[in-house]
Image (tube, rainbow, N blue to C red):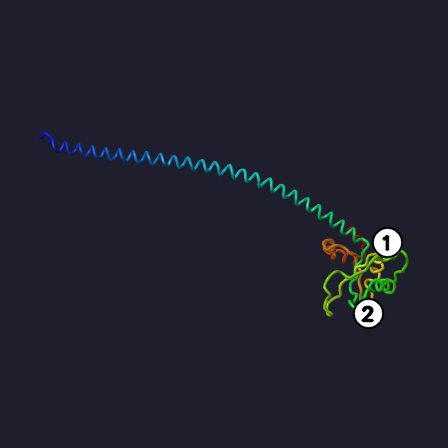
Amino acid sequence: PPPPNITNLFSEVVKMSNMLQSVAADVSTIKQTTSELNAAVAAMQERLTEAETRISRLEDTSERLHTAVGERSKLMEAMLDRMQVLENHSKRNNVRVIGLKETIGTDGTLLSCVRKMLTEGLGVRDDVEFEIERAHRVFAPLPDPNRAPRPVLIRSLRQSARDKVIMAAKEKRGFEWQGCRLSVFPDMTKELAEKRKAFTAVKKKCFVTGLKRVSIY
């Protein structure tokens, strides 16, 4: 074969040298980029580790708070139950009269009207045992004439008197006095009244079947 042309060989060598330089530059760029990526990954890993640590601490704090809230809730429920017991205990001598017209017992005569209502309407004997400590209507705005009158609260000095009034009212199942159809109920908190109301259907069935029942609370 003919000898290679020196000029062509030199040209090829120059091309190869340029290619090698370009490859070297590319490799250097890749190394730099890889180094930057490694640094970024390390920084992200550090931040992830920090985030996991903070999340773990927050979960621990949340669990402690959840436990504390549960304990406080139980304590609040116990305190509310005690308050209910104390409030209902303070009402043990009270009765609530429904249906007494607003025009009766005005001008400070409600107490005397209540005494007459108990003796004339219920047939309760007015003696020392039935001493009434006070009587007043519930604290609410005066209703319109076409609306039901406010209930009257009667507080006896002795619980035995209150119990006899309740028994007399149960026997009569409501009574009339001074043109009013009256009902007498034990005075209690709204919460206890709602609990007792839940047993209304059972009470009716017991009454129909002739079964005796007792409400403990």
User: Which numbered marker is on residue 160?
Assistant: 1
Q: How far apart are marks 1 and 2 (CA)?
A: 28 Å
The residue that label 2 is drawn on is: 179
Circle 2 crowding by C-alpha within 10 Å: few under 14, some 14–19, many from 20 = few
Q: Do the residues labelled 1 and 2 touch (CB within 8 Å)?
A: no
Which numbered disc flags the more N-terminal residue, 1 or 2?
1
Q: Is residue 70 above or below residue 144?
A: above
Q: Is residue 194 above or below residue 2?
A: below
Check disc 2 and give the amino acid type.
Answer: Gly
Question: In x, y percent, where is residue 10?
Answer: 14, 32
Residue drawn at (86%, 54%) of the image: 160
Question: In x, y percent, where is residue 147?
Answer: 73, 68
**Secondary structure state at the residue bearing disc 2:** loop
Which residue occupies the foreground of this view, 202 or 43?
A: 43
Question: In x, y percent, where is residue 21?
Answer: 23, 33
Residue drawn at (87%, 57%) of the image: 131
Residue drawn at (79%, 52%) of the image: 90
**Secondary structure state at the residue bearing disc 1:** helix
Check disc 1 and give the amino acid type.
Answer: Ser
